[in-house]
Image: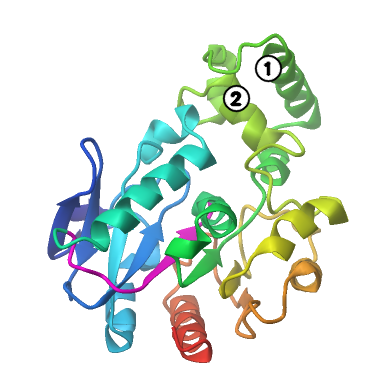
Amino acid sequence: MTHTTQQTMKFNGVLHRYNDHQVAFEYEPAGLPNALIMIGGMTDGLTTVPYIANLPHVMEPLDYSVVQIQMKSSFIGWGTSSVKEDVQQIKQLIDYLKSPEGGNKKKIVIMGHSTGSQDVMQSLLSISDDLEAGILQASCSDRECFPLFASDEVVTELNSKAKKLLDDGKAEEMLPREFMAYTNDTPVTVYRWCSIMLPGGDDDFFSTDLPDEALRKTFGNIKKPFLVAYSGADEFIPEEVNKPAVLKRWESFSNPKYWSKNSGIVAGASHGVKQPDAQKILYEKVSQFFQEFEI
């Protein structure tokens, strides 16, 4: 498998078909007793997360293979999918990996990048019995970053049009082409737009203006160890956001038994943690998290 950015990178491993239509890639060193499932963000697919290349070597001493999932929502499929549908496919992969065909993996941890963090949150809330732990990396708010790329007037107009279509019972219809100027030409359903862009949508786990009750139902209901690795120089987080305060607030609603003491800001990290020094910090946080909870 290859992924081309500024140069061609080659990855060795095993390609698994975990259901009739989707695959997952187990990076070398493959065949270890346990699995870290890597969930990419919006527009991601196999091998596209910047720090994925060295993550398998970080996990090898911990007896975890890294398995990156490809789902219906991968690449441009995010526009017609949902977090709940993602979790159904994550569950399929977990069941597969624990089967003889998938390698009889004993323990499963999931790690989400960007929108993949929403999948991790939903998984921790709904299929936690199948998991040992979860990692949320670059868990920023899509609706709060939208105004970075469009004027307030455009944001208000598009959200209003989408909300009216939703209220009219047209959740599964495709939005008009005018919306695609803000989705990299990705077709998006009314439901998915509202889920991501409107307060209280199914994707709205990480906005800084969420009421306390919303955080009690999410962070407060997690009953497995979890790590939050918040990118310190995330270009999709508005400059006015106080990142340490955001983390402190999330921690305040979390059970201290499960909130990792290694949670925190990955200094100098962009949204995708492209910087080698920031990647080292992220890898260290991940390694220490596994050791902290003896996962």
Q: CA distance from mark 1 to mark 2?
A: 7 Å
Give the residue at mark 2.
191
Amino acid at dot 2: Tyr
Q: Which quadrant of the view contains residue 229?
A: bottom right
Q: Residue at x 26, y 63 (%)?
A: 98
Where does the image place residue 81, in percent across and percent down from the top left? 47, 32
Q: Residue at x 13, y 65 (%)?
A: 12
SS class of the residue under badge 1? helix
- Image height check: is 234 above or below 31? above
Question: Which circle's residue, 1 or 2, is located before the other in the chain?
Answer: 1
Using the image as rendered, state which of residue 248 and residue 90 is in the foreground: 90
Where does the image place residue 252, in percent across and percent down from the top left? 81, 72
Q: Are marks 1 and 2 in contact (CB under 8 Å)?
A: yes
Using the image as rendered, state which of residue 1 and residue 63 is in the foreground: 63
Using the image as rendered, state which of residue 215 and residue 238 is in the foreground: 215
Q: Residue at x 41, y 55 (%)?
A: 39
Taking the image as drawn, is residue 125 in sight?
Answer: yes
SS class of the residue under badge 2? helix
Give the residue at mark 1.
166
Where does the image place residue 121, in percent across and percent down from the top left? 58, 56
Let me know if residue 103 is in the magenta part. yes
